[in-house]
Image: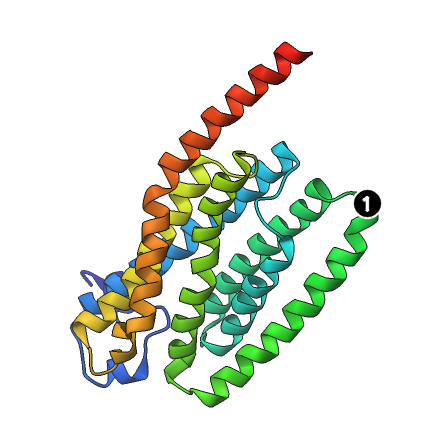
């Protein structure tokens, strides 16, 4: 039968929301949503990979590793709260494992042996605590597949990462732990993550009204502004570092 395979795949989408499906949207709505989800997951997985390789090479981490407890717990909690198929769960767990691999590389490369045990303990305790905090927030603000808390917490977690990357460059005049490939994947990851919720809101605002929340839109604007200026600040910090290196060479 013509298009038998294509027909068998019709109606199979990633994390479709019951409230959306009830309105019988055109299937292209779900296809765009699927594409944005896949792109976001791949970009952030690559971002973790590039962070890990840069941290290993520079023996320097751009920020405290303890902060990664928030992303670890976020990925683990929503893997269990939002998925309904084995494929969806496997994708979330793979994303979590990329994050965990980055944290492991950071601990081994950027921290001396004497500090590692304490940092590991703090990171583990914070991960568990934040996991239960997410569970509590989800019970206070229930929504289809926990998408409301996933949106707000995701926006809140990305803000200090993007802004902090710029602040570290300005403060330290040092590009160690950061790189162009990290920025590309992180910036595009932001656009696809926000684009997913914007797509939902533009098409079904009655189901996704919280996406237009003033606080969330303000936080997203600051995040994207930080990502926009990052390349210029990076080049400035790199040049400053080159000047300092030449000065140190002359002194020697």
Query: x%, y% of residue 49?
Result: 53, 44
Quarter of image, res 214: bottom left
Q: Nearer the viewer, residue 47 or 239?
A: 239
65 or 56: which is nearer to us? 65
**The C terminus, quarter of image:** top right
Q: In this view, does 26 lie to the left or right of 90?
A: left
Picture coordinates of residue 42, whole percent (x, y): 42, 51
Which percent across, then down, holds residue 192? Answer: 32, 56
Vertical placement of 53 versus 158: above or below? above
Is 192 situated above or below 209?
above
Q: Residue 19 appears at what percent x and percent y?
A: 28, 84
**Residue 101 placement, left or right of 43:** right
Q: Residue at x 72, y 63 (%)?
A: 122
Residue that appears at 33% across and 69% down: 216
The residue wearing badge 1 is 113
Image point (43%, 37%), residue name? 181
- Can you name the residue that lies furthest to the right here? 114
């Amino acid at each position: 039968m013509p298009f038998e395979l294509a027909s068998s795949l019709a109606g199979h989408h990633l994390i479709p929301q019951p409230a959306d499906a009830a309105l019988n949207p055109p299937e292209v709505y779900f296809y765009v949503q699927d594409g944005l989800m896949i792109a976001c997951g791949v970009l952030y997985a690559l971002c973790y990979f590039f962070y890990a390789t840069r941290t290993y090479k520079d023996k320097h981490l751009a920020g405290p590793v303890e902060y990664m407890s928030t992303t670890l717990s976020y990925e683990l909690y929503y893997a269990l709260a939002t998925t309904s198929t084995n494929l969806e769960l496997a994708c979330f767990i793979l994303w979590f494992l990329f994050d965990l691999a980055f944290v492991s590389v950071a601990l081994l490369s950027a921290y001396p042996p004497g500090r590692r045990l304490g940092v590991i303990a703090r990171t583990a305790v914070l991960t568990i605590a934040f996991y239960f905090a997410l569970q509590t927030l989800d019970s206070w603000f229930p929504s289809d597949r926990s998408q409301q808390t996933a949106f707000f917490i995701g926006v809140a977690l990305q803000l200090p990462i993007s802004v902090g990357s710029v602040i570290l460059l300005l403060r330290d005049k040092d590009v160690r732990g950061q790189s162009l490939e990290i920025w590309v994947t992180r910036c595009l990851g932001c656009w696809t993550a926000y684009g997913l919720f914007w797509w939902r809101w533009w098409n079904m605002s009655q189901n996704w009204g919280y996406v237009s929340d003033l606080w969330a839109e303000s936080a997203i604007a600051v995040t994207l502004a930080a990502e926009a200026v990052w390349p210029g600040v990076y080049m400035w910090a790199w040049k400053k570092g080159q000047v300092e290196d030449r000065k140190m060479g002359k002194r020697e």
